[in-house]
Image: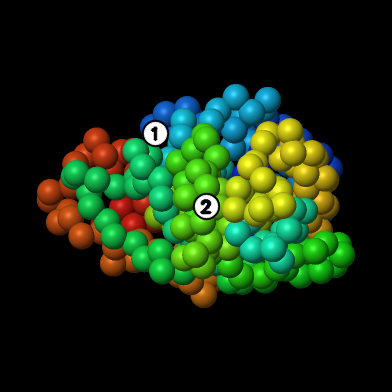
Amino acid sequence: MSAAVLGIIGGSGIYDLPGMSDLREERIESPWGEPSDVLRFGRIGETRIVFLPRHGRGHAIPPSEINYRANIDVMKRAGVTDLVSLSACGSYKAELYPGLFVLVDQFVDRTSGRASSFFGRGCVAHVSVAHPVGPALQGLIAAAATAEGLAFVRGGTLVTMEGPQFSTYAESITYKTLGYDLIGMTAMPEAKLAREAEITYATVAMVTDFDCWHEEHGPVDVAAVVKVLHDNADKAKRLVARLAADFPKERVPCPAGSHNALDNAIITAPEMRDPALLAKLDAVAGRLLKAA
C-alpha cells in the first residue's frame, strides 16, 4: 500500500490546526471549481497532514454552498489516503449531550440540490456506501480519544439536512422518532464523494445542542452553539494531535473497501466514455482510468 497521508476537514469552529511543523499553504486547482480554502500542509510527528476548513477561514461559506466535489478532489490531489471530518451537530438523545464526541458510522442524506457524485453522463459509476465510515480509521480515532481522556461514543446515525436554518419542531420530532442519533448539515455528500475518490473517511460529530425537541433546552440558537464550539474545538485539536502521533506510516486497507471502491464500479463501456469528463476524473479515478 501507499504511504499514509492524513487529511483533516475542520467544521464549524475549527478553521486552523495548530501544532503542525513544516507548515506551508498551497492553493490546488480543481476541475470541479474552487475548494473552500487553501490547503495547509504540515506534519505532526512523522505523520503528513493536510488541513482544509470546510467553511473557509472566518466561516464565510454556508453548508449548501460548499463545493464538496472540489474539496474532496483537492484532498485526493494532495495525496490524502485517510480523511477525518470534524463536524458540529445536534443530538436527538439525552445521553448524547453537548460537548460529547460521537464517532458515527451511518448517515441518512436529506439534502437536496448538492452535487453528490464525480460521475455522470459519459462515465457512469456505482460505488457502495453501505458502510461509509472506515472501521479501522474509526478505531484509531477511538484509541486517540481514549488516550486523551475525551468523552466519546462509538457508533451512531447522523442525518444530514440542507440548512442553513435549524430544524422545525416537527422535523426534529420526526427524526428522533425514526431513531436517528444526530443531525448536521455537512456530512453528505462529503462521505459519498470520499468513497468515490477511494479515500477512507470517518466523522467526529461534536455535539453542540439538542436540536429543538428537548423541552428543557428549547430551540437552538447560534450563541449557545458557539459557546460549546469553542470548547469542542480545543478538544478536537488534542484529538487530532494524538491521532497523528500514533498514525500508521503505511495506508491500512479499509475493511469497508474504500481503498478500492471503484473496482468494478464504472459501468460505461470504454468506447462510450466522455473524454472531457475523464479529464476531470484524473485524480479521483486515475488508478482505474490509467489502467483501462
State how far apart marks 2 and 1 are (Cα).
34 Å
Secondary element under disc 1, as helix, strand or loop, is loop
Considering only vertical position in the picture, is 250 above or below 71?
below
Residue 218, visible in the rendered structure: yes
Considering only vertical position in the picture, is 22 above or below 179?
above
Secondary element under disc 2, as helix, strand or loop, is helix
Residue identified by numbered label 1: 32
- Which residue is more in the foreground, 120 or 172? 172
Image quarter hosting the C terminus: bottom left
**Kind of residue indicated by mark 1:** Trp
At x 55% / y 28%, what residue is drawn?
A: 61
Q: Which comes before the other along the chain, label 2 or label 1?
A: 1
Residue identified by numbered label 2: 172
Q: Residues within 10 Å of mark 1 (few under 14, many from 20)?
A: some
The reply, left or right, for residue 254 in relation to residue 95 is left
Q: Position of residue 38 (x, y in %)?
A: 61, 29
Q: Position of residue 267 (x, y in %)?
A: 20, 60
